[in-house]
């Protein structure tokens, strides 16, 4: 009997504080003004047993997340991202994690708001 291949996902997370300003929003929108968020990042990657154990892969993913997040902590996001909406910040993080194994990047800018 042929066994179906499984996809096993590992995840890591981290948080950072950053300021931004979204000039594309209407004059009345509060995010148009300079403001800050406590962001929470969650990244998931496909686990590959090639060359490592589950724990070493999890540790590797977490270290990569930490490097990217540390570069954003206490920064002005507009210096790096033209329009720093949650979607664009998540894309920025995804691009810097740069691995074919990355499955998803989620970002929360507020307790009940964000993207997955």
Image (tube, grey):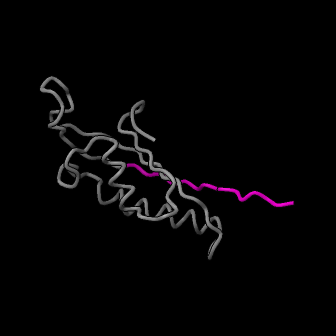
Q: Position of residue 106 (x, y in %)?
A: 44, 45
Q: Is residue 9 magenta?
A: yes
Toward the left, the furthest residue is 27
Q: Residue at x 14, y 37 (%)?
A: 23
Q: Is residue 82 left or right of residue 93?
A: left
Q: Which residue is at 46% across, 65% downward?
A: 99
Position in image of residue 90 (x %, y %): 36, 48
Outermost residue toward the front? 2
Q: Position of residue 76 (x, y in %)?
A: 20, 50
Residue 114 sits inside the magenta stretch: no
Query: Image check: 14 left or right of 34?
Result: right
Q: Between residues 6 and 55, which one lies in front from this camera angle?
A: 6
Q: Quadrant of residue 5?
A: bottom right
Q: Residue 27 appears at what percent x and percent y?
A: 12, 26
Magenta span:
1-15
| Total number of numbered discs in the rendering | 0
Furthest residue toward bottom: 51
Q: Residue furthest right?
A: 1
- The residue lying at 30 percent from left, 46 percent from top is 88
Q: Is residue 108 above or below residue 82?
A: above
């Amino acid at each position: 009997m042929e066994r179906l291949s499984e996809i096993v996902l590992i995840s890591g997370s981290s948080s950072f504080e950053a300021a931004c300003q979204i000039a594309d929003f209407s004059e009345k929108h509060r995010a148009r003004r300079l403001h800050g968020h406590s962001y929470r990042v969650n990244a998931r990657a496909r686990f590959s047993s090639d060359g490592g154990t589950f724990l070493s892969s999890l540790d590797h993913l977490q270290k990569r997340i930490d490097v990217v997040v540390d570069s954003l902590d206490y920064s002005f996001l507009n210096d790096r991202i033209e329009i720093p909406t949650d979607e664009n910040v998540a894309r920025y993080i995804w691009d810097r994690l740069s691995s074919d194994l990355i499955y998803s990047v989620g970002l929360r800018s507020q307790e009940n708001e964000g993207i997955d």
